[in-house]
Structure formats: structure tokens, C-alpha cells
Amino acid sequence: MTAKYYVTMTDRFMSGWGKADGKTNKLVISCHTWEEAETVERNASRRHEMKYVNITSHRPSYNPDRFFVSWHGRNEGDYESWFDDQIDWQ
């Protein structure tokens, strides 16, 4: 099943080092439904290192010279916990 929504965010903790050396680290989580996207957005907003959290219906595109982008979602079999409300995330 193809993703219908994407939750995008800037990971301030991972930006500037490792694979994102000299770049902004963007995290994109693909979602199948609006409800999934809302849950992921709520969870991301609870994390202090995540900034500029957005939901979009278009596959995002970032300049590779400025951004390191990591893609995740249920299709990839990871980030499963992001799809359940994580009230204790801070």
C-alpha cells in the first residue's frame, strides 16, 4: 500500500553530525491514513528534539546539499511505536 500522508520533522539532536554532518537532519514517516499521521504528529510534537513537525499529502523533497533525509514507516517495518500514542514521550 502506498503512503497517503507524510509526517515531516527536523531532528535537532541528529542534525550536524554523522550522516548529517554539516546538514539538517529531516525525518519523514509515511502513513497510510490521516489518523495515523495525526498520531505520529502528536508523538513528534511531544519530543523536544523534533521541530517543524508537519503533515503533508505530497511526498516531500529536500535539497540533498542542505538536508540529510531518513525515511521510515510501517512499510519499512520500523518506527512502529510512533503509530501508537506515546503520552510519556518528552
Image (tube, rainbow, N blue to C red):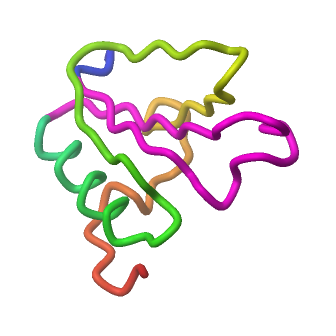
Task: Answer with the quarter of the image where residue 37 lies.
Answer: top left
Q: Where is residue 35 in the image (x, y as percent from the top left)?
A: 12, 45
Q: Which of 60 and 85 is in front in this view?
A: 60
Q: Quadrant of the N terminus?
A: top left
Q: Is residue 6 above or below residue 82?
A: above
Using residue 21 as the reference point, say whether residue 49 is left or right of it: left
Q: Nearer the viewer, residue 77 or 10?
A: 10
Q: Where is residue 90 in the image (x, y as percent from the top left)?
A: 43, 81
Using residue 18 as the reference point, say whether residue 75 is left or right of it: left
Residue 15: within the magenta? yes
Residue numbers of the magenta segment: 5-33
Using residue 11 as the reference point, say whether residue 17 is left or right of it: right
Q: Which of 29 and 62 is in front in this view?
A: 62
Residue 17: within the magenta? yes
- Which residue is pictured at 84% across the width and 39% down the height? 21
Q: In this view, does 81 lie above or below 55?
A: below
Q: In this view, does 74 lie above or below 2?
A: below
Q: Position of residue 65 (x, y in %)?
A: 72, 15
Q: Nearer the viewer, residue 53 or 5?
A: 53
Q: Position of residue 57 (x, y in %)?
A: 20, 20
- Which residue is pictured at 39% across the width and 58% down the height? 82
- Which residue is pictured at 38% across the width and 31% down the height? 30
- Which residue is pictured at 52% across the width and 36% down the height? 72
Using residue 81 as the reference point, say whether residue 21 is left or right of it: right
